[in-house]
Image (cartoon, rainbow, N blue to C red):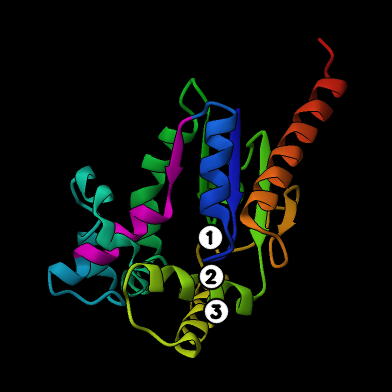
Amino acid sequence: MIIAVDGPTASGKGTISKELAKYFALPFLDTGLLYRAVGWTVSEQGGDADHAADALAACVFDSSLLDNPGLRSEAVGGLASRVSVHPEVRRALDKRQKDFAYQPAGAVLDGRDIGTVIAPDADVKLFVTASPEARAVRRFEEMKRRGEQVGLEDILAEILQRDERDKNRTTAPLKAAEDADLLDTTNLTIDAAVQQAIAMVNAKISGRRDKDPA
């Protein structure tokens, strides 16, 4: 079974995806970390995230980089959004994501184009969203816990800019797949959001079984 979870930054899709992977005993991949790794590498190499050649060169990185907690910073998130607009970068990372999605054991992947590009025939597709204001507060609280000093208004501005880039890039823009189930977490606790996501997946699986009893 392949579960594709898409949505904008700080919508809760990462936590929801991890919990879905645990609940259904499936391998999990946070595809956003791949783009964060590229953004990080561009910066370390002194390149320009807005320059396609620099971003493509940064796609060659050791997998151990994905365990670097520094990738979770707001600054690297911004770099990830910038490098992700380059079609060359998306093509370079597509195979790694598709190989993970279509492994025999199945998988849960979260990102921005899983249900539309990486695994368009996924068994279950969820699009997790929330208002920009709610997402900004969540990111603000998360960064405070990490000891990072940043203003709420600055975070909201960055989220709006990132949304704009992600939705309007020419290759694999952020959007819900036509057959995705929408999960709005604006007014949900994370526990409630996870339980709702599990229920949505179970309903989809049950519906498939009803259609194909054999």
Badge nearest the viewer, 2 or 1? 2
| N-term mark: 2 or 3 | 2
Q: Residue at x 68, y 38 (%)?
A: 124
**Please, what is the three-letter code of the amino acid marked with disc 3?**
Glu
The picture places residue 65, in percent across and down from the top left corner, at 22, 50
Which residue position is annotated with label 2?
A: 138
Magenta-drawn stretch, dominant element (helix, strand or loop)? helix
Residue 54: which quarter of the image?
Answer: bottom left
Which residue position is annotated with label 3?
A: 164
Locate the C terminus and report the quarter of the image it occupies: top right
**Please, what is the three-letter code of the amino acid marked with disc 2?**
Arg
Q: Kindly state the secondary structure of the residue where label 2 is placed.
A: helix
**Please, what is the three-letter code of the amino acid marked with disc 1?**
Ala
Locate the N terminus and report the quarter of the image it occupies: top right
Report whether residue 126 is seen: yes
Q: CA distance from mark 2 to mark 3?
A: 19 Å
Mark 3–mark 1 CB contact (< 8 Å):
no
Magenta stretch: includes residue 139:
no
Which residue position is annotated with label 1?
A: 172
Magenta region, residue range: 27-41
Q: Kindly state the secondary structure of the residue where label 1 is placed.
A: loop
